[in-house]
Image (spheres, rainbow, N blue to C red):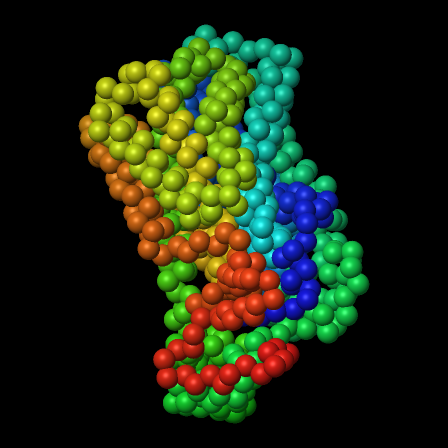
Amino acid sequence: MVHSSVLTALDKKKVSWFHFQAIIIAGVGFFNDAYDLFVIGLLTKLIGRIYFIPSQPPFPKKVPTIPIGPNSAVTAVALVGTFCGQLFFGWLGDAIGRKTAYGVTLLIMVVFGAAQGLSFGNTAEAVVTTLCIMRFFLGFGIGGDYPLSAVIMSEYSNRRTRGAFVAAVFSMQGIGIITGAAITLAVAGSFKSNHPRPPYSVEPIASQGYPASDFVWRIILSVGCIPAILTFYYRLKLPETARYTSIVARNAAKTAVDMSKVLKTQFTEADARIQRDADRIDASVAAAAAAAVPNGPLDFNGDHGHAVESKKEGWWKRMRRRQKQAWADFKRGWRSPKIVPFDEQNWGWFLRHYGRYLFGTSSTWFFLDIAFYSQNLFQTQVFTVIGWLPPATTMSALQETYKLARAQALVALWSTIPGYYFTVATVDWLGRKTVQLMGFFFMTLFMLILAADYPSISKKKGAFVALYSLTFFFANWGPNATTFIIPSEIFPAKFRSTGHGISAACGKAGAIVGAFGFLYASQPKSAAAAYPYPPGIGLQLTLAILTIANGLGLICTIFFVPETKGRSLEEFETPGVVGARHVELAQSTAPRGAATAVDTEAPPPPGLHVAPPAASARVAV
């Protein structure tokens, strides 16, 4: 376990204005994510009515929409962009620093968020193509904010309220949903009142409300970048986290200067220098580590043991040799014991000793997002059952946008949004794993009830709406928040951002499966009933598969996800560490004046001789 006076001060710091400022700065990406996800479903319907209606009779009986392929592309490219951004910026956050990469993601969100409202022309093809390009890069920036925001907030938090702070960053999605609804209602309502149009069934062309309706979707999409613009300066001024500068960058002087400002306490370079217990890094450990690796001591940051490159060597041979060397390094890392010098921690070592945790965070996020992003399968039926959304042919384009936004906002207010804040209030009390288990359990239960008798339940207004609402309430008061929190805590600082990015990307892969795979799968088996979609397996069988996905998330949580409540991040720098929390507990319960002998770390691997600690049990590393 690593130590420093600065990191101890961060762990014990009381809640301050700096924490709330960091929550707002870090939460902007999740605001944009939820805002964009909320409004795009509404606006693709509006765009379909503007650009995909015939210019002259005969007009279709149903209101025109964007064809399935382009419509899926407009939504999917943002998810694919998010997936790529999570992987790239997760890696970049560990490679060059959290703060350095952080400003880039916000700049991308500002530029491409505003550019969504533009187009390369006024044809349907030009509008859809522009949206796809801009939304991919917007998603790329939003994806980068997942690992960076989570890790930055986690590394700045004290260990007592860390879960609530990281959950509060994620809960900015709730603010994004509410804001998206408010902006859509305000803009669509204003243009609807000033430019009244007949319903589609009366006059199809006039019901478009063009050009007013064309301004509406462009304004709503572009306005979403304003919070990012307002916080851009403050994000650039946010100092690099102490965990990165001291543990990864090994810059104790910068850590002392930055944290003196943040914590309002004067620190010296010695206060910021990372230390480890001497019995973990003495010569016997180094000797045992070298003995465990047949090819000698590891040196992944230098050129030790690597062949010198020849300028005359062809590029193909050079690439092949580098691949072989990288694979050899990985295997040596895989064979390394748990406790090795910092410079010898590579991906082989990480996957060997933290791979179980990585599988747990990735698999649970994947299964969660399959179910969470399938909620669109039910929304239309929920609105129909409640009676909030009349047939589209009885409304003009702006009337449909306004009423659909109102209906989605009300459902979100009583189902999904409250769950975010229940998590903030309880995650440090109940624990991350407990909240995640509870959420998966109830999601599995409610979806099982829906799947068991869907044809009958869907006709019962109260039961259907209650089961729908409770399913997604427990998604947010459960794994939707905790899958975001846990990866920001359980990995060592050198791999923390990358580990979170991999976990989040697996979640987005599940989102793509849930949003599109199950959309097609849920269609009726009859080709006529499924049109314009291809025939599927039906909604009831789809619900049964979603129930299984939730159950698998529950199982993976039980076996592969650890509890992190109340533990210092530094406890996870060494695999198998018994946390300092246990030391403090033992000391607090010992008789006054009695010596407390508590081993602050897990026992060394079998066969590894560890010398007894000296009187001064810490040395700098």
Depth check: give the residue in front, 615 or 296: 615
Does any portion of residue 308 appear in the rendered image?
yes
Residue positioned 39% across, 65% down in the render: 355
The residue located at (62%, 43%) in the rendering is: 28
Residue 40 seen anywhere in this rendered image of the structure:
no
Residue 176: give x, y in percent of width and height.
58, 34
Q: Based on the displayed image, in which of its 4 quarters is residue 530 positioned? A: top left
Quarter of the rendering containing residue 444: top left
- For the point 50% across and 69% down, which residue is it? 598
- Number of labelled discs? 0
Residue nearest the viewer, comparing 436 with 456: 436
User: Residue 297, image x and y in percent?
Assistant: 48, 88
Furthest toward the left, the residue is: 526
Task: Work out which quarter of the rendered image holds the N terminus and state it.
Answer: bottom right
The spot of residue 602 in percent (x, y) is 45, 71
Q: Quadrant of the C terminus?
A: bottom right
Compared across the picture, whether 43 is left or right of 110 comes to left
Measured as percent of width and height from the top left, residue 93 is found at 58, 61
Seen in the picture, residue 260 relative to 381 is either above or below; the reply is below
Picture residue at 68% right of the left edge, 60% below the top = 9
Is 576 positioned to the left or the right of 151 in the image? left
Q: Is residue 82 left or right of residue 458?
A: right
In the image, residue 531 sits, relative to residue 284, either above or below, namely above
Q: Quick check: 434 above or below 258?
A: above
